[in-house]
Amino acid sequence: MVSYKSKSVERISLPSREERERNLQQAQYNVFNLPADAVFIDLLTDSGTGAMSDEQWAALLRGDEAYAGSQSFERLESAVSDVMGFEHVIPAHQGRGAENVLYGTLLGDTPDAVVPNNTHFDTTRAHVANQGAAPVDCPVPDAHDPDADEPFKGNTSLEELRAVVDDVGADQVPLVIQTITNNSAAGQPVSVDNTRRVREFAEEIDATFVIDACRFAENAYFVHQREDEFSDATIEEIAREQLGYADAIVMSGKKDGLVNTGGFVATNDPDLFDRCKQRAILYEGFPTYGGMAGRDLAAMAVGLREAVTETYVADRVEQVRTFGSLLADVGAPVYTPTGGHAVYLDAAEALPHLEATAFPGQALVCALYREGGVRGVELGSFAFPDTDRPELVRLAVPRRTYHREHFEHVAETVKTVLENSGAISGLEIATDPAIPELRHFTAGLEPV
Ligand code: F0G
């Protein structure tokens, strides 16, 4: 059941087939290079692309733009305290700004550190590496099996975690991260029980435990549905319990903050707060605005409270599930169970004639645009070179934006692409940027 209606709308249109082909060529077969008005249904990301509520738009008008001590910051502080349980908040311009502040602070003193995470998102991986540390993924074995029917495929593998520490020694592991939901493992949720165990382990090795909380509300909904201990708890209670195990969180407000920009670090540790503040001033701005306009702080304060309301988050996750069913109904190889913010397709299964070196995921992304003006994103061997990942294509769902008819169009598009899949050719990289972890954003490709 949908618990909102539209008050403002934006026109979209489908360019002709010839225009779509020309656009792809001009974009060098990298859909990050497409102009947004050439895209009909934009499923590139759920990050900052959703619709704000009227309450959030009202809050924008009341934004306090004071450089220091803004009231909008106070509203954000109290929302973070009520919803997430942390007293100290350091705003940042978006999630990766928060990552720079927190990981720069925590990793600066340990040369050659090793940082385990259930799975690093690409900016997290790049920020950890940027501090001279080695990011290591510790997913559970089912995470990369698109067919395993398990409730918490986003969990951290305690065995892998222990193996990493046994290998390099606890002194080299000053930080353990857990990402909820696990974006790079098909948006799969993490159980509270798993978070608790990772916390205990981090304590045992005297490491700081950080949760990447970008999609904490969606994760809490899955916990409510799937973890017996929490079937009677509210989304807010679950969120506070799960986040409460962390020493600090990094947050991109562009996800479950329900805003178009912004992020923050939050903690209850006064010493860590103080150290982060110093770095935040250097990179983000004075710690009561951190690179955000006062009005955006105000909208995020409202968004965080909306994100944990039962009706909002149920609509949200169930819409993504329905989208997954529409795709499965047309025979698409859908990663199951569907995750919180996106449906992931297995491109290796969709295009079995293409080797990993011909980037089947990117070929599928281009085919979806060519056929139906649909923009998704590759999260396989093009985005993650040298890692042993499945060839996934992510169709991310912006929050409160598209309706069933839009998803039906995407399903029709996928159906037609699959019917003609043998004709889809592979791609090779024509221009390769300097930072390998980030190459998929800007590399140019050409058909082979
Ligand atoms: N951590 C996770 C788990 C993310 O998914 C993202 C962003 C970030 C950190 C960085 O946040 O974009 O505000 O700087 N994910 C987006 C995506 C970009 O498309 O999944 P940011």
Image (cartoon, grey):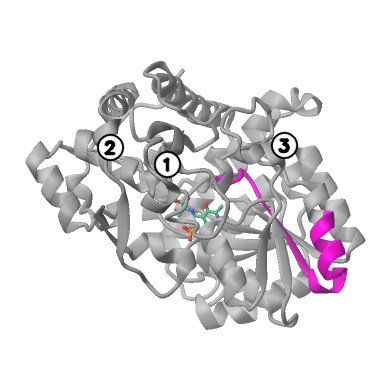
- In the picture of the structure, the residue carrying the numbered disc 1 is 393
What's the amino acid at mark 2?
Leu
Is there CB contact under 8 Å for labels 1 and 2? Answer: yes
Q: Callout 2: 10 Å neighbours few (<14), some, many (20+)?
A: many
Task: Give the mark, 1 or 2, whose residue is nearer the N terminus.
Answer: 2
Marks 3 and 1: which is nearer the front?
Answer: 1
Q: Callout 1: 10 Å neighbours few (<14), some, many (20+)?
A: many
| Mark number, residue 368 | 2
- Mark 1 → mark 2, Cα distance in angstroms: 10 Å
Direction from residue 279 to residue 341 in the image, left or right: left
Residue visible at 27% across and 28% down in the picture: 413
Q: Bounds of the magenta span?
A: 162-183
Query: Image height check: is 363 above or below 402?
Result: below
Q: Secondary structure at mark 3?
A: helix
* Residue placed most toward the observer, 325 or 379: 379
Q: Secondary structure at mark 2?
A: helix
